[in-house]
Image (spheres, rainbow, N blue to C red):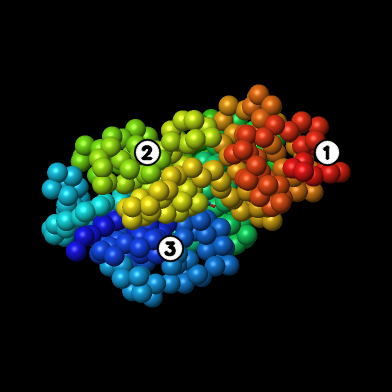
Amino acid sequence: MQQVVIIGASHGGAEAAIALRTQGWEGKILLVGDEPTLPYQRPPLSKGYFHQAVSDQQLLIKKPTLYEKAKVEVMLGESVTAIDKANKSISLASGASISFDYLIIATGARARKLSIPGSDLSCINYLRTLADADKIISQVNAQSHLLVVGAGYIGLEIAASASKLGAKVTVLESFPRVLSRVTNEQMSEFYQNLHAQHGVDIKLNSGVTEFRRSGERYVAVLPDGEELTFDSAVIGIGVIPNVELAELAGLECENGIVVDNKTITSEPGIFAIGDVSNHPNPFYQRQIRLESVPNAMEQAKVAAATICGKEKTHDAFPWFWSDQFDVKLQTAGLSQGYDSTVIRGDIAAKKFALFYLKEGKVIAVDAINSPKDFMKAKMLIPTGISIPESKLADTSSDWFE
Ligand code: FAD
């Protein structure tokens, strides 16, 4: 019987395993993951799970019985150490070798590490896995001071969640504004104000040069020499795609594993999906690597359909969300390369949409507590709509009529 092997049991891997069965794959399906738990959702780790609004059972991506029903063999706590593309087999850390007819690589990404004196102290954390989250949460309480290094989405979400738990929070960011890679100045200012309103201290143009122990607590030395005492820290300075297996196997890699619009790698029969894949985007007409759940799930469905002999291409429009305090951000599209922006709504009321335009066309939107604008933008931007800026800004009528 033919077998599909999937490496990585998370958003992409779990979705691919079930989608294979629902799309009609009759052979064997093996899902191998190096974490000890069934696939779980990562986004709540910095949000609801962190501030205890979501339980570990609610984190599961699929009900445990679904894998049995779909006859998916799940191998947990097992690391794949090599891919032999000529012999169509993988090697496991435990020594076994398993053959495949099709292989899906869904190895995701890992946290980028900080390498400075003291960065190996036990109070220095990274948030990627459930185990990471449990360790961080155990170090945060209403009496503790959490230091967050990096003001990207994950760093700011952690800051908001820790603050909800009553902890004192300081965020260090090397750029002059938060979220500088992904939003414009107005949106950065909005988030800086939001955190300031909740007592989070954000230090911009800052960073850390050294950590050291100080009795029961720890000290971070900032670039200007200031010393900051804290109890635990989380470093949120981005991720690195887990491409090593693919690279060793000789698959084409560049900022991820390079795939086509069917998620096929440079080797026919081997697919790559999710955070680890660098794929073509028809709207932006370039290769991109996304770190988002919707992308991992969509690519999983495309890989499964292709393996089942169906015609399906990956042309989904990128979208993402972030929850901080009482603010839900939903973004559609990528704003890089914009030449103008329009605000629709009321920033002070925390309900508005920021449209990014390039040569008169809307290319992305950041919607704050504005799900309707987000939904419409997600549908309409991929069609290449041009809407006058005055219409986008005018809240007395819909912009999308
Ligand atoms: P991953 O989830 O990274 O899973 C890859 C799996 O493969 C891991 O379990 C890994 O251990 C395993 N693996 C790697 N190598 C091997 C090997 N050799 N052998 C066996 N197993 C291996 N996205 C959003 O869209 N919205 C959000 O709000 C959001 N918030 C987030 C908050 C946090 C704290 C984090 C960490 C991420 C967040 N993301 C969010 C990103 C989202 O979680 C990722 O885009 C998504 O998890 C990608 O899924 P994936 O299956 O591609 O990879």
Give the residue pinned by disc 2.
Answer: 260
Whether label 1 touches label 3, CB < 8 Å? no
Q: Quadrant of the N terminus?
A: bottom left
Q: Secondary structure at mark 1?
A: loop
Which of 197/73 is in front? 73
| Residue 216 seen in the current view | no
| Secondary structure under the numbered disc 3 in the rendered image | loop
Q: Could one spot residue 186 in this view of the protein? A: yes
Counting residues from the start of the chain, the first of labels 3 and 2 encountered is: 3
Q: Is residue 41 left or right of residue 4?
A: right
Vertical comparison of 129 with 109: above or below: below
User: In the image, which is nearer the foreground, mark 3 or mark 2?
Assistant: 2
Residue 106: image tag:
none
In the visual, does 355 lie left or right of 233? right
Q: Residue at x 28, y 67 (%)?
A: 73
**In which quadrant is the C terminus drawn?**
top right
Q: Which mark is residue 394?
A: 1
Q: Is residue 42 above or below residue 208?
A: below
* Amino acid residing under circle 2: Asp
How far apart in space, not on screen, are marks 2 and 1 (Cα)?
Answer: 40 Å
Closer to the chain start, of discs 1 and 3, is 3
Identify the image quadrant of residue 387. top right
Residue located at (27% from left, 46% from top):
270
Whole-percent x, y for residue 121 in the image: 37, 49
On screen, residue 117 versus residue 400, left or right, reads left
Q: Residues within 10 Å of mark 3 (few under 14, many from 20)?
A: many
User: Closer to the camera, 129 or 148?
Assistant: 129
Residue at image position (20%, 55%) is: 100
Residue in the picture at 33% in, 74% down: 68
Which mark is nearer the camera, 2 or 1?
A: 2
Callout 1 amino acid: Asp
The residue singled out by tag 3 in the image is: 40
